[in-house]
Image (tube, rainbow, N blue to C red):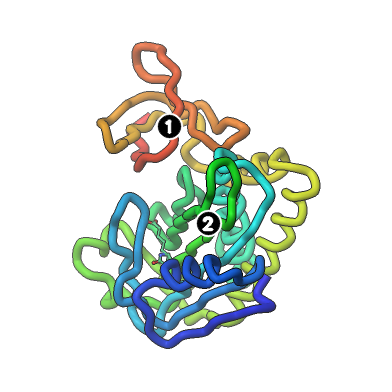
Amino acid sequence: LGRNIHFEETVTSTQKIAHHLAYEGAPEGTIVVAEEQTAGRGRLDRVWHSPKHTGVWMSIILRPNIPPYQAPQLTLLAAVGVVQGIQEATGLEADIKWPNDILLNNKKVVGILTELQAEADRINSVIIGIGINVNHTESHFPDFLKNIATSLAIQKGEGIDRARLIQCILVKIEKLYGEYLQHGFKIIKLLWESYAISIGQNIIARTLTGAIEGKALGITDEGVLQLKSLDGTIHHIHSADIELTQN
Ligand code: BTN
């Protein structure tokens, strides 16, 4: 990964540029990194706050030969790689909240957004967008984020070298991706579960169609969340925000 790096000062969104490059035939492993995004995109159509020189805003182009329904596995793979890369670069031990929020002290420090370019049953490319709050101080966060977001520097109590962080994360993701292509999702799933805080807990899953409360049983082999609701029904959740309730 990262043999082909596009570094930009200001962009609307690294996802947008990566989509364009992928469409034009950019090779697997191409990375887009920017110092600032003016229209950073989050999951579920949200905005991703991406101020200048403080974060890591990057998108990775992968071209795996897998059916589209397995793509969520790559999101989980990326989350594992980011947790391991953060651990290596800073010593901080982060948790994963399904599907791919990365938390320190229960506050969000990383968001991951996976998007596909697919035709019928074939993936053309997977664009994995990773946003990391690195050297933000409290004053970089707008009021509505102050209680729910944090940065690596706030948690560590010192500034973090962003270039080294990117390098550590790319090395980890590359290793996991090689493992995944060779041996499948099994090992990635075990690693993901070892970092996940939501499994076995009572949660509320807010989907676009409503909220379901119950116990998070685990993830399927495709990376889909299994939730047992209060009436005993098992639900398969593909996309939602989850909140841990008091257990
Ligand atoms: C989330 O909602 O948690 C996902 C946030 C993903 C943000 C990253 S920053 C780099 C890439 N470019 C974007 O516009 N979004 C992703």
Kindly tell me whether residue 155 is visible in this rendering.
no
Q: Measuring 45% from the left and 18% from the top, which residue is drawn there? A: 234
Figure quadrant of the N terminus: bottom right
Q: Residue furthest right?
A: 182
Asked which quadrant contains residue 161, the reply is: bottom right
Residue 27, horizontal then vertical, whole percent = 65, 70
Residue 120, horizontal then vertical, whole percent = 54, 42
**How dense is the environment of label 2, judged by Cα within 10 Å: few (below 14), some, or many (20 and up)?**
many
Figure quadrant of the C terminus: top left
Q: Nearer the viewer, mark 2 or mark 1?
A: 1
Q: Residue furthest left?
A: 143
Q: Secondary structure at mark 1?
A: strand
Q: Secondary structure at mark 2?
A: loop
Q: Measuring 59% from the left and 35% from the top, which residue is drawn there? A: 222
Q: Which residue is mark 1?
A: 237
- Whichever of callouts 2 and 1 sits on the residue coming sooner in the sequence is 2
Q: Which residue is mark 2?
A: 94
Residue 38, horizontal then vertical, whole percent = 30, 76
Q: Amino acid at mark 1?
A: Ile
86 displayed left or right of 65: left
| Mark-to-mark CA distance, 2 and 1 | 23 Å
Residue 17, horizontal then vertical, whole percent = 45, 73
**How dense is the environment of label 1, judged by Cα within 10 Å: few (below 14), some, or many (20 and up)?**
some
Q: Measuring 38% from the left and 72% from the top, which residue is drawn there? A: 13
Q: Amino acid at mark 2?
A: Ala
Please say if 76 is above or below 22: above
Q: Quadrant of ligand 1?
A: bottom left
